[in-house]
Image (cartoon, coloured by chain):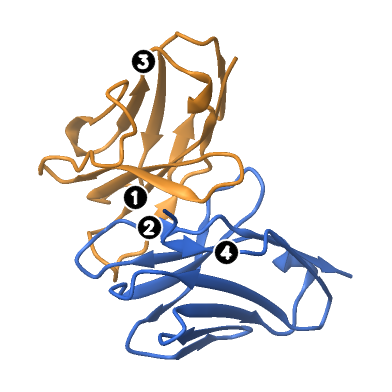
Chain colours: A orange, B blue
Amino acid sequence: GAGVSQSPSNKVTEKGKDVELRCDPISGHTALYWYRQSLGQGLEFLIYFQGNSAPDKSGLPSDRFSAERTGGSVSTLTIQRTQQEDSAVYLCASSLRTGADYEQYFGPGTRLTVT
Amino acid sequence: DQQVKQNSPSLSVQEGRISILNCDYTNSMFDYFLWYKKYPAEGPTFLISISSIKDKNEDGRFTVFLNKSAKHLSLHIVPSQPGDSAVYFCAAQLDSSYKLIFGSGTRLLVRP
């Protein structure tokens, strides 16, 4: 019964570099979410995947952010040309289905620091 | 424009006493409210929820109260234990949406 896993746990990068963050959801979970938590803020929704449907990208803060989910399982969040304001903890969550009846299980997060 | 607000960044309580964490929201259309608990270096874990059609939900030591007219909810922990020390996030959700809208969290410290 592995939970949601994320890698790396910590990432320090220089401004302007690209980074990739990985999420392995719970096996069998069809819904996958990315959130981020900036210092002193709550979790902010970024993007949502459900099965083979088109993802909801409405929370992505800029076109430097993109995400994909391959084979309905692993997801990668990519940030291009990182900026200092991108520094945050990026959290991935998955749920069995979509809807309020289905709990979202969170991974431990990736702490991104842009210097 | 924060739709969910937790105005107390921290709370300190003596072991055995009641902890009360508060949350305010602005959108009267929210259908569900949830509390998540987060330990350092771990992801948030679901604690308890309440539907907007109810005003109270209880689970062991945890009770959530919802006051729709005031757009306010609170989480009561009785009795508080040192292991309850964590950051507590309030979140809200529309029934038609999968998005959780979070507050900024309250750090609870339960002193032995």
Whether callout 1 and callout 4 share a subunit is answered no
Among the 4 quarters of the image, the one containing residue B105: bottom right
- Which residue in the structure is indicated by mark 2? A104
> Given this view, does label 3 or label 4 mark the residue nearer the observer?
4
Q: CA distance from mark 2 to mark 3?
A: 27 Å
Q: CA distance from mark 1 to mark 3?
A: 24 Å
Whether callout 1 and callout 2 share a subunit is answered yes
Give the secondary structure at mark 4.
loop
Q: Position of residue B56 (x, y in %)?
A: 47, 90
- Which residue in the structure is indicated by mark 1? A94
Counting residues from the start of the chain, the first of labels 1 and 3 encountered is 3
Q: Count residues near mark 2 (Cα–Cα under 10 Å), then give few for <14, some for 14-19, many for 20+.
A: many
Whether callout 4 and callout 2 share a subunit is answered no
Give the secondary structure at mark 2.
loop
> Given this view, does label 1 or label 3 mark the residue nearer the observer?
3
Q: Above or below — where is B11 with respect to A112?
A: below
> Quadrant of the image for the C terminus of chain B?
bottom right
Q: Amino acid at mark 2?
A: Gln
Whether callout 2 and callout 3 share a subunit is answered yes
- Which residue in the structure is indicated by mark 3? A80
Do the residues under discs 2 and 3 have CB atoms within 8 angstroms? no
Q: Count residues near mark 4 (Cα–Cα under 10 Å), then give few for <14, some for 14-19, many for 20+.
A: many
Q: Amino acid at mark 4?
A: Gln
Q: Above or below — where is B40 with respect to B21?
A: above
Q: Position of residue B11 (x, y in %)?
A: 75, 66
Q: CA distance from mark 1 to mark 4?
A: 25 Å
- Which residue in the structure is indicated by mark 4? B6
Counting residues from the start of the chain, the first of labels 2 and 3 encountered is 3
